[in-house]
Image: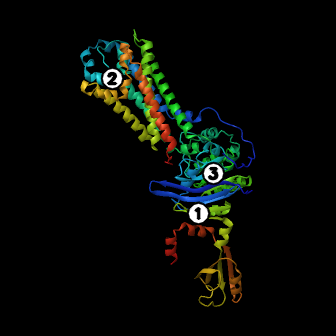
Amino acid sequence: MLTQQPAIVIERLQKSYGTIQAVKGISLQVQQGEIFGFLGPNGAGKTTTIRCMLDVIRPTAGTIRVFGWDAQRDTLSMHQHIGYLPGDVRLPGKLTGKQIIDYFAHLQGREPVLLHDLVARFNVEMKRPLKGYSKGMRQKIGIVLAFMCNPEVLILDEPTSGLDPLMQKTFNALLLDEQARGKTIFMSSHVLSEVEKVCHRVAIIRQGELVTVEAVETLRKKAGQLVTVEFGDAVAPGELERIPGVSDVTQSNGSYHLHVSGSMNALIQALSGHEVNRLLVEEAPLEDVFLKFYEVPAQAASVTR
Amino acid sequence: MATASIAKPTSPAKKWGRGLPIARASLANTTIPIASGGAYAILIALLLGALAPSLAEVDIGAYLSSNVSTGILGGHITHLGGMTVILAIYLYSAFYGLLFGGIVAYVSGVAIPLTIENGTLDLALSRPISRTRYYLENWGAMLLAAVILSLLTVFASWFATLFVTHPDLDWKWLWITQGMQSAFLFFAVGLGMLLGSLSHASRPAGWSAVGIIALGYLLNTFGGLSDKYSWLLKISPSYYAPGIDPLVYHRLIWWDPGVLLVAGLVLGSIGLIVFNKRDLPTT
């Protein structure tokens, strides 16, 4: 359930390494009970932002607050209520899954009330030394470590990395279950289709700057629809391109493929004047919308020219 | 101060945890090096016990009293004879700091960077664990490892007496000598912790600490060669942990271990400040 009071507030966050600015003054808010996607190309500043949230690295400027606690000054209070999954789950090989889970449960100081459910849900191997674990198996341990003490806020860095499709589906179900129980989830991801399925809103960061923060539903509307039409009669050159909302018209194997933004009404009226043998309409993948934001504007312009 | 309310957890979470998990995990990582050091000490002691009667008959007084031997051993011996002298030369001379101090410096240097390499540091600090607590638990674990190694070498000395007919060991002065060496180990821990706090790679940090211990040994060696180089002694930590003087001659400068303890405390404390302030890397 979303409320007015934000769970996470990032204000004018900056992080520099010498002359290199990794994060250039980003500001965003994550509402309570929301699943928030944090997207961007490699090196955009996603992991840097997350590590600033955890106080593992210190911002050059700006503030981060989680439920009102300052991430740098109130670290201990804040960390009692968060669960974290790093982008690369590395664990000491000598220990077993059970030993590493026990160790971090003790550090958290809270009973791992969700442990058994998570172990069963993800079919986690507990008894073998971790050095024998594959990447996916370590990722599952990482997920257990993040969720097991029932934290109010989850901060997840590429959580489905290394998981097979079935486990990805299981993980998505876990996210939705936790969100239904009021948890706030902040996750970075490269798997745009997964983001589309679970996130309420997304922020896209590029070269250390926030490009956009939008609801997934809004982006879905912006994405428009892909239409495939097979005509039984001739179509005048340029006729489809002149229809309002229609763009990217191509033709192959006797069919026309086009992109429609906004209302379909103009297209339907135009098609009504023709003999239509086949008409296929599908939602345009959000991935295309995301990728447009990933591109640097100059590069995007040169591609479209 | 938090002003927002937090959604109540669906199931109440009990306070859960015991002991010092970071310290226990850090101490577990020292098992092999410390056990190796202890085994080596016992081996030396066994050899000493076996060779003591033969060594007592050897007349190498001129060699032992030379400046070169004084430099190498970190102390002046005039005759080779008796269990105590042999123990002083082979276990409690300047070699003690070089060998066992080197072991302790290495494991201390490795302690924190190892947790960066194996991914546990990020996960630990995402819990309600302060960097200070994390560092202090590691420091405490390393000091405990040094104590264990100290006790192992005392045990080795006792073990050696089982093989000698008339062991002339003065236990009071053995414990005092061990105390001096333990002060050196305390220094070595502080040195290792400082270098570890600066590094994200465990082996370079560990071996850098060993290198400084070895450098200190060399300074002590060269400083003992001639009066011209005696100033080198004062800047060598090995100088402040003589083994031969207290064990053989029952001579002691009481503030010597104090120098090492203060130096170890200062180095370890600087390491704590560095660890608290720096950005922690992912690898």
* CA gap, disc 3 and disc 1: 20 Å
Tell me which residue sits at (49%, 75%) in the image: A302
Mark number for residue A204? 1
Amino acid type, label 3: Arg
Circle 3 or circle 1, nearest the eye: 3
Callout 2–callout 1 Cβ contact below 8 Å: no
Question: Could you tell me residue B158's position as x and y percent?
Answer: 45, 16
Q: Which residue bears the numbered disc 2?
A: B74
Question: Could you tell me residue A71's position as x and y percent?
Answer: 60, 48
**Can the viewer see residue B132 in this picture?**
yes
Residue neighbourhood size for the residue with mark 3, other residues' Cα within 10 Å, grouped as few (<14), some (14–19), many (≥20): many
Question: In the rendered view, how is the structure colored?
Answer: rainbow
Residue neighbourhood size for the residue with mark 1, other residues' Cα within 10 Å, grouped as few (<14), some (14–19), many (≥20): many
Q: Which residue bears the numbered disc 3?
A: A65
* CA gap, disc 2 and disc 1: 65 Å
Report helix, strand or loop for mark 3.
strand
Amino acid type, label 1: Ile
The chain carrying label 1 is: A
Tell me which residue sits at (37%, 34%) in the image: B212
Report helix, strand or loop for mark 1.
strand
Amino acid type, label 2: Gly
The chain carrying label 2 is: B
- Tags 3 and 1 both on a single chain: yes
The N terminus of chain B - image quarter: top right
Q: In the image, is B175 to the left or to the right of A272?
A: left
Circle 2 or circle 3, nearest the eye: 3
The chain carrying label 3 is: A
Question: Could you tell me residue A238's position as x and y percent?
Answer: 59, 88
Tell me which residue sits at (46%, 39%) in the image: B196
Nearest to the observer: residue B81 or residue B264: B264
